[in-house]
Amino acid sequence: MKEIVIISGKGGVGKSALTASLGSLLAEKHRVLLTDTDVDAPNLHLAMGTRLIDFQEIAASDKAFIDYHLCSGCMTCVETCRFAAIIAVAQPVIMPYSCEGCGACALTCPEQAIAVRPVVNGRINIYATSGLSLVTGQLAIGGSSSGRLVDQVKRRARQEAENSRAEIILIDGPPGIGCPVIAALKGADYALLVTEPSATALHDLQRVVEVAGHFRIGMGLVINKADIHEVSRRKIFAFAAKNRIDVLGEIPYDISVPKAIANGQPVVAAYPDAVSSRQINRIAEALLDAVPVMT
Ligand code: SF4
Ligand code: SF4
């Protein structure tokens, strides 16, 4: 089984739309499980026209709780908390959105009145669409520990992939370079990078390549909306060459893509003859060359 993670650094460059189309194309030749690890804003299911078949609440975050029967009101915990998550009123009060679950207050409380317990910080949704299953993570509003939630999403995805004997897990990664991205990359075989010709996208691409480089896995690059700025496009090619990253393909700006998304379909399914669809077909082939899958 191969795990391919699609990441971009910058959000909004077309990562999920590309994941939806690649998932759809790869599923013509292989058993594919799609996974959305952008737990802050999961939307791959919207781009695929799926229906929810199962969900599971996840407690992958810790919070501190005070037992006021034991509390003496000494306020040591207020001094201890480095996240300013405990405020002193008549009694100490823990602000749940600020608590990082580090446990320092529990360690220093002289009355052992504080306990740190797991709390629900999100859910895993299982969707089905024609011929494909999709596992997504969804962080609760104000939820913390998104990296740990991504870890749980990947565990569930691997379980589902094993049950369905999937040959490829195709993962829509989170934007940024923090814990969720690291959790998405952990155990992956290949990182497919997506960018667009703009200074901000290139800047974020450089940062995410640095992160992915630590995992010593193969990397390939796709340039989306490749025709919107020629100077930036050339800079991306120069960066890829310098870092020995293969450019698997370029997708021109194509109005068919947002139109397909609006209809809840990958562009390769909604408009198979569109210029973007033809390019994505080539990218899917290049991806299978870069990540050979045993059948
Ligand atoms: S340190 Fe413990 S006993 Fe002191 S105020 Fe905080 S919870 Fe209460
Ligand atoms: S667990 Fe850590 S972050 Fe939360 S209230 Fe206690 S000291 Fe503050």
Image: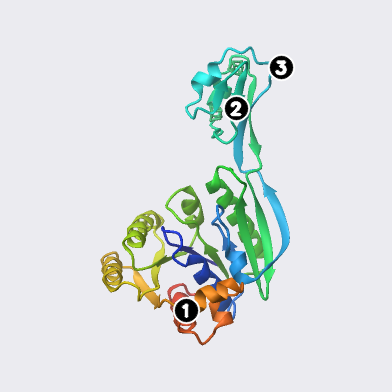
- Gap in Å between the C-alphas at discs 2 and 3? 15 Å
Identify the residue at horizontal 68%, vertical 19% (top origin).
68
Alpha carbon distance from label 2 to label 1: 50 Å
Of labels 2 and 1, the one closer to you: 2
Identify the residue position indicated by label 1 in the image: 280
Q: Are marks 2 and 1 in contact (CB under 8 Å)?
A: no
Residue closer to the observer: 88 or 27: 88
SS label for mark 2: strand
- Residue appearing at x 61%, y 55% in the figure: 137
Residue 212 in sight in this render: yes
Residue ID for mark 2: 94
Q: What residue sits 73% from the left and 59% below the top?
A: 54
The way the protein has been coloured in the rendering is rainbow
Amino acid type at mark 3? His
Q: Earlier in the sequence, mark 2 or mark 3?
A: 3
The quarter of the rendered structure image containing the N terminus is bottom right
Q: Is residue 142 left or right of residue 79?
A: right
Q: Amino acid at mark 2?
A: Ile
| Residue 258: numbered disc | none
The secondary element bearing badge 3 is classed as loop
Residue type marked 1: Ile
Residue located at (49% from left, 19% from top): 79
Check disc 3 and report the residue beneath it: 69
Question: Quadrant location of ligand 2?
Answer: top right
